Structure formats: C-alpha cells, structure tokens
Image: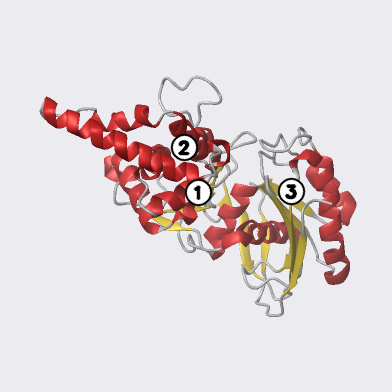
Amino acid sequence: MLGYISTYRLARFQPACAATLLSHGAWILAPSMSHPLLLGIEIGGTKLQAAVGDASGGTLAAIARTVVDPAGGADGILAEIERLAQPLRAEHRPAAVGIGFGGPVDRAGRVVKSHHIHGWEDFPLADWARERFGLPVIVANDADTAALAESRHGAGRGANPVFYITVGTGIGAGLVLDGHIYHGHGVSVAELGHLRPGLHAEGPDQILESYAAGWGIAAAAQARLRDPMRYRLGELRGNRRRPEDIRQRLIEIEEAGEADAGDLLDRCDGQPERLSTKLVVEAATAGNRMAAEILRQAWQALGWGIAQAITLLSPEVVVIGGGVALAGKELFFEPLECEVARYVFPPLKDSYRIMPASLGEEVVIHGALLLASVARSG
C-alpha cells in the first residue's frame, strides 16, 4: 500500500455543467439540468487523488487521497487508482471519468512519459481507465487540467486567455484560450519549466526548473552552504565604493555569510542534503539574507520565463499555484511581479494581471471533473 489513504464525504452540492465537444476540438461548457455525478482523478508525482462531484466547481461529494511511492512505478500507482476509485464508483455511480496526469499526454489519452515515476512511457491510460471503470474517459496533462479549472471556477474566471502556472516540485503550465485547453500541434505545450534561460543553456538539464522549481531552489541552497563566501562576494559586482569601503564590506559579508549559513545548517540538522525549499522560505521569512538571496535569484529566473510567455501569448490573467507559491505575497508574488515587469515586452507591461490560484489542493480534481463532463457529452 502506498502511504496513507484518507476519504472525505461532503454533503453540499451545486448545479453541474455539461459540455459539448465540437468538431474542431473546442470544449464548450454549458449549464446542465441533469446534475450528473462524475469521477475525477489526479495522478501526480507525489500524490494521488480521486473524487466524485459535478463540474460546477462546488463542494465534492467524496474524495480519497494517498501519497505516491515512486519505487512502485506506474504499476503501483495503477493499483492504487483502483483501490481509491472503485469504491467511489460503486457507491456514487458516476457517468464519466476525467484524469489529470503529471506528464505529457497525447490527444488520445496515451501517456508519453512521466518526469518523476518510471514505467509510464507510452502507456494507454485512457484505454486502461475505460476498461477498468466501463465509463467514458478523457485524460489530459495535470497542469492543463488545473488551468481549465482555474479559468472556469477560480482566479481566472471571466478572463481570456488564461495562462496557469504551478510552481512546486517542478514547474508546469497550461493555456486556456476561448474556454478550452490549447493543445498545440504535438503532445506537449506551455512547458514553461523546460525553457532554457539564455543562449548558453544548451543541455536538456539546463532548464528553468533547475533555477526556480522546488528541487532547483534546494540545490542552490545546498551549493551555497558548501561555499557561502563565493556567492556573497557577488554582492560587490559593479560596486563603486572606495577600496577601504570595499574591504569593510568584505568583512561584513563574510560575517553575515557565516551567520546565515550557520542558521541554514541548524534548520537542516547539519545535513545540507536535507535542506528543502520550505526551510529556505522559513529562513528568509526570519531574516536570513542568504536564503533571501537564493529566493531572489529563483524569482528572477521565473519572472524571466513568465515574461517570455506573456510576450508570446498576451494572456489577460496569469494564475500561479503550487507549493512554492505558498511563500506568499511579500516573499513571492511582489518580487516576482517586479521581475516579470523587468523582462516583459514593454507594450504589454500593463496588459496582464498576476493572480494567486484559488482552488487549492483540489484544483486538478475540479479540472478532471470538467474533463469528465466533456467525456460524458460525447
């Protein structure tokens, strides 16, 4: 069994929405009088959720969740999906299934790969789910699925286009245009985290995630603990002070670097490899200057990436969710907005809004229920 399982049954319900799949692939959502129950599933790199509800964005009828054990691979997760979802299906008899998957998915619902869990390569997830549940199924990338939910029910409601970004273990994104997910021509689109910042970033590992995703921030912090002085000296670049002033500043920087590094070491019990983004954020909140500088560089890279997306796509709203974004307004959103403004195409500078996501941990589930409403309608 993977981790723990928790199930919630919730009483209040709101009207549903049905959807029509047009010949060109656009998904048009419209109110439905039948209020069908639907099954939504989220398959992430660290968690698995299954829920029953309608497509209105209201309170769910029931939800079950568990943590993912990467060692079990795709087979272990498929077994967990059945364990979580089959009891919900038996009790609530949903009319269709929507699935948000943490990786690239083609239009037929076939998984291309997972960046976190082995065994998903070229897996026909939609076909598997149809066979297991005996219901219509649509599968989409989890960031695309979340984007649909936030544009329909969340922070992007009423805006067009909506560009959604999740900043957590990785960096994912999705574009909702005219009310439906933009899929592009291939199997993947809006891969913000896989942008390569600068002409020097020639390798596939030199991506935006390595600067601003959770693992990238943690890696930067661990590197600074190994050589704090090297990075603190960067503060003197372009300094026009007199030589004696610079010598004094060097002393101050060295002392501050030692104190900040010591604080970070204390927070990870003297084991740099255990230093997480969460600990870095906590240290920065408490006034640790080294931690604040690590975050500043991460937000600069992320702001550059978002500015490129705005310059290319001109969204009305950019919605940002994910665990890293929980750092809050002063530590995350305000400095990030400054970095976006620094790099965006100047004529677009006042054309967009950056908003925190509003649907929380269940955002992919609500998007999956919208997918299920499309599957049900045909």
Disc number for residue 221: 2
> Horizontal placement of 368 versus 296: left or right?
right
- Real-space Cα distance between discs 1 and 2? 10 Å
- Look at the image and tell me in which quarter the C terminus lies: bottom right
Rendered location of residue 325, percent (x, y): 48, 52
Disc number for residue 68: 3
Local packing at callout 2 (Cα closer than 10 Å; few below 14, some 14-19, many 20+) is many
Is 266 in front, or is 55? Answer: 266
Q: Earlier in the sequence, mark 1 or mark 2?
A: 2
> Horizontal placement of 353 versus 372: left or right?
left
Going by the numbered disc 1, the residue's amino acid type is Leu
Going by the numbered disc 3, the residue's amino acid type is Val
> Horizontal placement of 114 versus 171: left or right?
right
Going by the numbered disc 2, the residue's amino acid type is Ala
> Horizontal placement of 128 versus 107: left or right?
right
Which label sits in the foreground, 3 or 1? 1
- Residue at 78 percent across and 39 percent down: it is 71
Disc number for residue 279: 1
Is 314 in front, or is 245? Answer: 245
Question: In what element is the residue under mark 3?
Answer: loop
Give the answer, above or below, for where 35 lies relative to 42.
below
